[in-house]
Amino acid sequence: MFRMIFFFFALLILFSSAASDEMVQEDEILSSRSESPGGDFVLYSSQGKVSLKQFRGKVVLLYFGYTKCPDVCPTSLAIIAQTLNELSEDELKSVHGVFISVDPKRDNVQVLDEYVRHFHPNLVGVTGSEGEVAEVARRYGAQYEEAVIEGSDFGYAVNHSSVTYLITPEGDLRFMFPHQTPSFVILEAIRYLLAGK
């Protein structure tokens, strides 16, 4: 059963269109890394420190982005919110979303709090120093870099990979979903993990 589901998600990642104007380059593939991707981290929200460990017993949807992202982040967070909305009330108690800003210079904890609130109450926005964010991104293979925008009031954009990471209740990274993966696919994966598989 696990092999069938793994094969299904592998095919999805292989054939889904993960291309985006904001992507720096192709997302890293889990199997190409010399170390196991993922892992615990501590960053900060408007409520204080947030660690991955505090979500033990819950499935976590993790996404790297920034609040001034014009389209990719809102699309991805809308899909995450739609997925969360499709869970039952009992299921929702065991699922949480974490949005990590890759633009810590502009996205303070208050800005992040207001931003994620527009999508779903089970989402928390977190950030840290540039070094702290870079280290968490490195662990998960997320890529990003600033790009100057001439004549823009924003000054720069942040080109970044767009992947939704699905983490087990034990804190292990299990699935990576490329940009615009349908919510029903993510929903089935969440229920798979909630079932202890």
Image: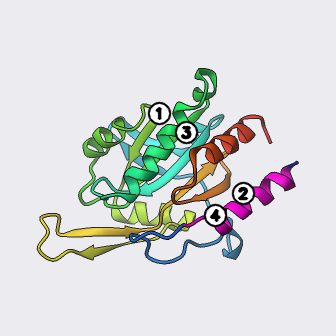
- Judged left or right of residue 193, residue 155 is left
Percent of width and height locating residue 118:
33, 37
Q: Is residue 10 shown above or below 111?
A: below
Circle 2 or circle 4, nearest the eye: 2
Report if residue 147 is visible in the image: yes
Which residue is nearer to you in this view: 104 or 153? 153
Calculate the distance from the C-alpha at mark 4 to the C-alpha at mark 3.
24 Å
Q: Tell me whether the residue at label 2 lies in contact with that at label 4, contact meaning CB atoms closer than 8 angstroms.
A: no
> Image quarter for residue 46?
top left
As displayed, is residue 85 above or below residue 90?
below
Q: Secondary structure at mark 4?
A: loop
Image: magenta residue range: 2-17
Q: Residues within 10 Å of mark 2 (few under 14, many from 20)?
A: some
Q: Dot 2: what SS?
A: helix
Looking at the rendered structure, the kind of residue marked 3 is: Thr
Q: Which residue is mark 3?
A: 83
Q: Comparing marks 4 and 3, which lies closer to the viewer?
A: 3
Q: Are marks 3 and 1 in contact (CB under 8 Å)?
A: no
Q: Secondary structure at mark 3?
A: helix
Question: How far apart are the two marked residues, 1 and 4, measured between alpha carbons?
Answer: 24 Å
Q: Quadrant of residue 10?
A: bottom right
Which of marks 2 and 3 precedes in the sequence?
2
Q: Name the quarter where the C terminus is drawn.
A: top right
Residue 37 disc label: 4
Residue type, numbered disc 1: Asn
